Amino acid sequence: MKLKPLFSLMAAAAMSLTALLFVQCTPAQDFQLGNSATVIPLNIKQGTTAHFLTDYYPQWDGATNLVANDERLQLTPTADNWAQFDITTQSNDALVSTIDVWHDAEKLSIVVLGGQRDTQGSYMSSTCAKGGNITIVASKPVVEAVAMWQNEVIEDVKIEGNTIKVAIPRVAKGHQRSAIRIFAASESGRFNDVLLPLEYGKVVVDAEDIRRQDFQSQILYSLMIDRFNNGTTANDWKINSPEVLDKVDYQGGDIVGITQKIEDGFFTDLGITTIWISPITQNPYDAWGQNRNPDTKFSGYHGYWPIFSTVVDKRFGTDEELRTMLAEAHESELNVILDYVANHLHIDSPVLKEHPDWTTDLMLPDGRKNIGLWDGETRLTTWFDEHIPTLDTRRNEVCEPMTDSALVWVRKFDFDGFRHDACKHIPLNYWRMLTHKMKSSMPDRQLWQIGETYGDVELIGSYIKSGMIDSQFDFNLYHTSRDVIIDESRSMRDVARTIEESEAAYGSHHTMGNITGNHDKARFLSLAGGDLTLQNGDDKSIGWNRKVVVGDNVKGYARLSLLKAIISTVPGVPCVYQGDEYGIPGGNDPDNRYMMEFDGYNEFQQAELAATKALFKYRRGSMPLMYGDYLTLYVDDDVMVFLRHYMGEWAVVALNVRPEARQVEVAMPEFVGAESAQVALSTEGGKATIEGGKVALNIPAYGYVIVNE
């Protein structure tokens, strides 16, 4: 399937487990951008919470007035022009309401959702669209609902028991891409929210009509430029010092090498829609850091030690080669996002030499060095190493030029957005300033931002707002899935619970990145095959001192396919780290950063690559997997079965993490009206039949079955 280019729907979302606030990314006059609304965090339990208007409308510095449409909410400005405001509520009951935001004569709306998200039997989904009306069916009687087209409240909404009828606004017919979001609550709590992309006012029901920048459809490929493909030897360079082992010296990968792989169809054949490239900024030419056993320093081949934040490192290529790569990517219907480092600069950076006071303090008051203290009160000040001081972007005089440096990359080059490094170590004011500048200075650009944060859902979600970044990598889902697949004492109930926690925290249609691994983790395959254990998998010394292999090839590759089945079918955006598509072993950094191989695969790798392509192809052709509403149908220690449903179309996904095949029968929701079932994709031995609204599944050992009508 070839995806058509157009601006995207955005549904990255964040909320606390107890409350959330829904807002649209762009003002009404910018409908050509095609944004759907973004859910952002807001606790409205009994008491008062503080908020920034730019978190909701980043292009506005303030508003004329904010008006609550519900007596349960009280609004109080705490800064001029409502730039900051408080919301006070006396209730913790389920709440679905709106706030009107007036900007001169223009009114836009915010949807406020409070109380508990009821995950025990509260579910709703779209069933059809006829005569300009959308029908939503819920599992319980609906007591209140709000529907939004872009930023505007849809007035024509009817609640009839378990059914919600929503009229598509006529104005939607004049816009190639827009979106409707529906929120509702029952007496027992809030339902999941529903997202429906529109094309000229009609609900999109065919995956052929999805564009490459409809970001719910993304499949990311993460690559480290120096270790991906050497397109030209003209820019090859090494430190060639006895202080630096070759394993951590430059290997020759470059921008031309990426272009070659775009042109030969590597990404398209795999099913990728977005390429995430490692940092390309100028890094030092000498060695830094120190490893013991073996003794070695390191080159900056990875790109994370910027000397100049706005200069392409000539070892990777030239400005013109970068522009050519981006043009070829877009011609092939691929997005490209740039890994950008804002937390620190290399100590030899001319900027730091001119402004040595721009860094946080290396020494703490108690005499300790503030290095690697990732959490607690040092989270925003800690250094990664002595040669890469952390910038104090809490200060405006530091934040302003650093956000301007990031903007250079999307102004000078046609990138589609950013992957942001070390998000949780950078204060919120940086993200507000950067996104405000991006959206106010480039209103016609649709730029997607995903960040890296390790922590709980509250911390991760605090960065995900219309005026900050769109999504983050869901490391909690990765770690839980990894551990449950590998450790037979763990339960699939943990995976189901984590999926539901992510939905409650980031929204039902978030674009959180669901990963196979990354350049900072031991290869999943070696953990799955048993050559590494969960206890020693993060030990960087292992890869230095012995050759890390798979272990049990049959078990290892089956489990890797199972992980990909999870990330390809649950809400969020699949992201494969280079080499995981066919499966290579390895320990932690730098043992997970070998030069990419494009041929010569063994029989297990060939089968793994074929399975990856099949999963990604199915996902990109399935509206339920891209936009469908999620419902767990069955879960026990070994097996999980869930439904993805969209506009009367459905897919049932069954996963088995243990070495014995399982037979499970699940009841389909009544409104689905499932009369037949076929296996769309499965590991060997997967079967499914349906009778009386119940689907009987045979799920292979370490396997998966995807069923549709």
Image (cartoon, rainbow, N blue to C red):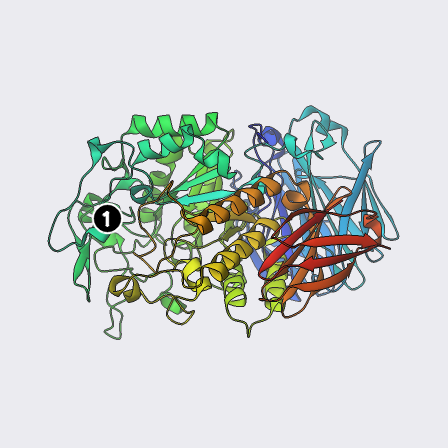
Closest to the observer, 495 or 75: 495
Q: Residue furthest front?
A: 603
Q: Is residue 538 above or below residue 177?
A: below
Which residue is rendered at x = 32% and y = 41% of the image? 225
Q: Residue at x 21, y 34 (%)?
A: 235
Report whether residue 16 is seen: no
Q: Which residue is mark 1?
A: 300
Q: Position of residue 175 (x, y in %)?
A: 66, 26
**Compared to 497, does 216 lie above or below?**
above
Amino acid of disc 1: Gly
Residue 552 figure quarter: bottom left
Rendering coords of residue 343 (x, y %): 33, 52
Between residue 568 and residue 146, name the one nearer to us: 568
State whether residue 214 is above or below residue 560. Answer: above
User: Which quadrant: the N terminus?
Assistant: top right
Q: Is 131 on the left-hand or right-hand side of 397?
A: right
| Residue 417 point in image, percent of width and height | 45, 38
Of the pair 187 and 203, the residue shown nearer to us: 203
Residue 675, percent across and down? 84, 47
Kindly indicate the quadrant of the structure image that contains residue 8.
top right
Q: Secondary structure at mark 1?
A: loop
Q: As drawn, is 16 to the left or to the right of 364?
A: right
